[in-house]
Image (spheres, rainbow, N blue to C red):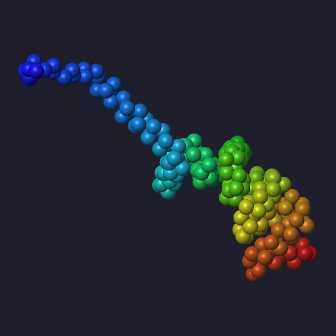
Amino acid sequence: MSAIDPGLAAAPVLDERPYVIRTYDRWIILVLVVVLGWFLFRPLFGFAVYYRGVSFERMFQLQSAQHYYIKSTRIYPKLPEGWQGWAELLMMRAPSDAVVRRQAVTVLQRGMSYNPHSGVLAFDLGRTYFMGKEYAKATQAFVQSAQLMPNDMFSWDYAAWSSLHAGDVPNALKYWRQVLRIDPGNAVAHRQIAHYGG
């Protein structure tokens, strides 16, 4: 058997396809990593964008802050802080502008639909209703906030004031008694209970 002349051996065929096509498997892996990373780390991205809004708010650049708060709710709507920041910026103008107050209510209601266990959003919703003198709705929101955060004296206190303004003195007294369970030395609650004959 004769040896094959090395010079006559066939040269390897070079792959002349474009680089992108030759490395399609790497691109598929990259796309998978990016897509999975987006879904896995979306809460972190949402919080990072929210915190950027906080930075702008601290620099009194409120339009930019609102932009980032809104963006954070789009990235991850189950992050209550984004909804809270957005609504509280609106609440700054709410006492003098009924349209903005309705916007704040809408934002907080949407935030609550994604975060039904957020006592902070319920509390802000109550404050917004209270500003608009919608005391019955404010009471409901503050009671919900108090149920979600049972040791929050301010939720019970606001619920009491809302009930009082709505003409529901018995519930107001009941809520002030809740305040005294949390803070037995609360002078306002003692005074209101004594005044309204509790």
- Residue 95 visible to an observer of this rendering: no
Which percent across, then down, holds residue 96?
Answer: 69, 49
Question: Quadrant of the rendered structure where residue 186 is?
Answer: bottom right
The vertical placement of 185 against 128, above or below, is: below
**Nearest to the observer: residue 179 or residue 58:** 179
Q: Tell me, yes or no, if residue 33 can be seen here.
A: yes
Q: Against 174, is 108 above or below?
A: above
Q: Position of residue 103 (x, y in %)?
A: 68, 43
Farthest residue in the front direction? 1
82 or 158, nearer to the observer: 82
User: Foreground residue, 28 or 128?
Assistant: 28
Give residue 26's position: percent from left, percent from top.
Answer: 36, 34
Numbered-mark total:
0
Left or right: residue 160 compared with residue 149 = right
Q: Which image quarter holds the N terminus?
A: top left
At x 78%, y 76%, the residue is 181
Q: Is residue 17 above or below residue 119?
A: above
Residue at left offset 84%, top offset 54%: 136
Q: Which quadrant is the C terminus positioned in? A: bottom right
Residue at 43% in and 35% down = 31
**Which is nearer the eye, 73 or 15?**
15
Which quadrant of the structure image shows residue 141? bottom right
Rendered location of residue 170, percent (x, y): 91, 67
| Residue at image coords 79%, 76% | 180
Extreme residue toward the bottom, this view: 185
155 on left or right of 1: right
Rendered position, 155 above or below 27? below
Left or right? Give the position of 180 relative to 12. right
